[in-house]
Structures are given as structure tokens and as C-alpha cells.
Amino acid sequence: MSWVDVIGRDPVPWLLDPGNPSARFLTLRHIFRKPAASLQEEQARILTWAPVLRLRRHWVPINFWGRATGPYYGGPLGNFGTLFLLAQLGTPRFPEINAVCENLLERGRMPDGSFGPGEKTAAPWLAYTGIALQILTHFGYEDDPRTQQAWDVLTETVQKHPDTLGCTLAGRGCRAAAVKALGALVHRNGDRPLENDAETIDILCTFLLSHSYEWGGRDIDWTLPRFPRYYETDLVELTHVLAHTEHRSDPACRQVIQRMVDMANPTGSANPTGSRDPSGRWIKAKTTPALSEEHIHQPSRWLTFEAVHALILVYGDEIYAP
């Protein structure tokens, strides 16, 4: 079975619309698997795209997009949230980014080297640390000793506390936080996780897949695809990170994948619970005020890219493979 057989349509040509240089770049890089060096011009177009230009115009010295004294101030609209948004878009590093990343490294870390707000907690903030590592890896800080320390803390946290991952305040597991940590690990080395991270990845996957999801009840929020994301997550992101791991063939993982595929809407009408339209495009059900480029209840190129890429990782590809 091919990934096209699974969804019945091929939406990839739609993802290449130059009107969205972010989704186009991500598609060329990960679905067409073109080398990064050959896509520098494509990626640079993200910097001159209207949504990113607006963000760059709103950047100011000292406080950037929020408050220099509090990187997490402002949530998705502040410094931390905007860095994560730009990383999700595939934005290349540009001069203003350097100061904000340095501010995150100086002001956003806990005493143990993990990332999180100033509140004292019994264990590291897994969600903050996972998001911060995604940001720093994307913008070229992977070799910074402070980034390496955060990787060490994340690994130690997952391996020593596998049953209470994520929520440091409640002292219980938080699967959204585990998704952010897994997302950092699977993209640490491009699209191929490092062998040294195998044990940590296995623990996170087991934690995520051992949960008995109630898609129509307590876990219904997972069925509401969103982009961009902040702390929250959804089935598309969950499937995308799991598809990068060896657990992609596990029966429990296949059930999650199938649930993502089954978010189908054969009539193509707006469906606030999340769906695919007849063209095989995933529809956005939620968003944040950080980016208004796509509207809810409409097909999303970013969500469709993630879903298709996940299916390619699971079922293989004979259409766009180089």
C-alpha cells in the first residue's frame, strides 16, 4: 500500500504554491528530499514573505517581540513564541534572531540548564525544554554548550522519570509536553534521530502510545488540527513525530495514524472537529493569533504537509523520492 492509496488523493502539487514559500520550502526539503544547499533561494523567500516581514518590522531593540527580562512573556506573541513560530515556518536565521536566541539562552534557562519560567518546580519543564531545543537546533545553536546541557537534562529527565513526564506542577504525565520533547529529538539530526537518543525516544514513544485515547471524549482536543502551535498539540503533530521513529510500525502507532487519516470529510464542508477535504487536504480547526495566514475550517498547507510527510515516512514513497 502506498501513502496515496491511504488518503486517495495526492495534494503535494498544491503544497508547492509559491504564494506560501514556507510550505513550499518544507515540501521540497522533506517530501522531495532536496539537499538544503540547493534550497537556499527557496528558503530565503520566507524572509520576504508578508507574514514574516510583519514580524521583522515589529522587532525592536532590547525587548524584541516581548520583554527581554522575561522570554516567555506574551505567550505565542512574545519572544519565545515568535522564535518557535519562525522555526515552524522553516525561516532561515537572520540578524535579529541572534539577539533573541542569546536572550533565551541567558534569561530562559533554569539553574539545572533546562528551559522554563522562573517558578521553582521539582523536575524540569519538558514542554519548554523541548520547544527551546527545537528553536535552537533550527537556528544553528546545536553546538552551543548551553544547548548541550539542555539536551543532557532532557535525556536524564525522560530516562529517570518515565511515568511522570511533562507536567512539573501537577507531578503527572503530560502527553503534549512529551510530543514537544520527542519533536526535538527526532529533528536533532535532520530527519534521522541520533542513535544515542534511541533509548530516550523509545521511552517517549511508549509513554505516548500506551495511553488509551478517547478521541470523542477527554482527548477530543487532539482531533482539532492547528497551526502554528505553541504548547498544545494535535493528532497531526503526534503522528508526524511518531512516524520519524522505529515505532511507526507498532500496532498502537498504526491506530494513531489511522485516526489521523480518518479525520475525513467527504462532503468538503467546514467541520470544526477537523477533517480532510475531498482533495486530501487537512483542514485547520484551531490557530493562534501569532499567524493569520490560514483560516480555521479551511485547508492548511502546513497541516497537509505534515500529514503527507508522516504517511511517506510510514508507507514509503515512489512518486517524489529522488
Image (cartoon, rainbow, N blue to C red):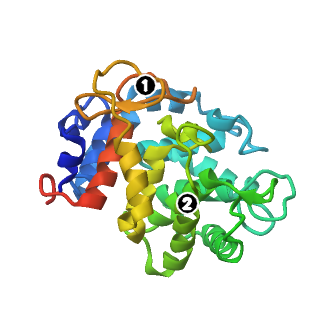
Residue 265 in picture, x, y percent from top left? 33, 28
Q: The N terminus lies in which quarter of the figure?
A: bottom left
- 320 relative position to 151: left or right: left
**Looking at the picture, which amino acid does disc 2 mark?**
Leu
Residues 173 and 13: in front is 173
Seen in the picture, residue 55 relative to 255 is either above or below; the reply is above
Residues 186 and 258: in front is 258
Seen in the picture, residue 7 relative to 146 is either above or below; the reply is above
Q: Residue at x 78, y 50 (%)?
A: 117
Residue 303 seen in the current view:
yes
Q: Label 1 near label 2: C-beta < 8 Å? A: no
SS at badge 2? helix
Q: Earlier in the sequence, mark 2 or mark 1?
A: 2
Residue 96 seen in the current view:
no
**Looking at the picture, which amino acid does disc 1 mark?**
Glu
Disc assigned to residue 293: 1
- 148 relative position to 23: left or right: right
Residue pointed to by mark 2: 208
Q: The C terminus lies in which quarter of the figure?
A: bottom left
Seen in the picture, residue 152 relative to 120 is either above or below; the reply is below
Q: Around disc 1, counting alpha carbons within 10 Å, would you say few (fewer than 14), some (14 to 19), or many (20 or more)?
A: few
Q: Residue at x 19, y 40 (%)?
A: 8
SS at badge 1? loop
Q: Residue at x 34, y 18 (%)?
A: 269
Residue 160 in picture, x, y percent from top left? 70, 77
Q: Around disc 2, counting alpha carbons within 10 Å, would you say few (fewer than 14), some (14 to 19), or many (20 or more)?
A: many
Residue 85 in picture, x, y percent from top left? 52, 40
Seen in the picture, residue 311 relative to 272 is either above or below; the reply is below
Residue 23 in picture, x, y percent from top left? 33, 39
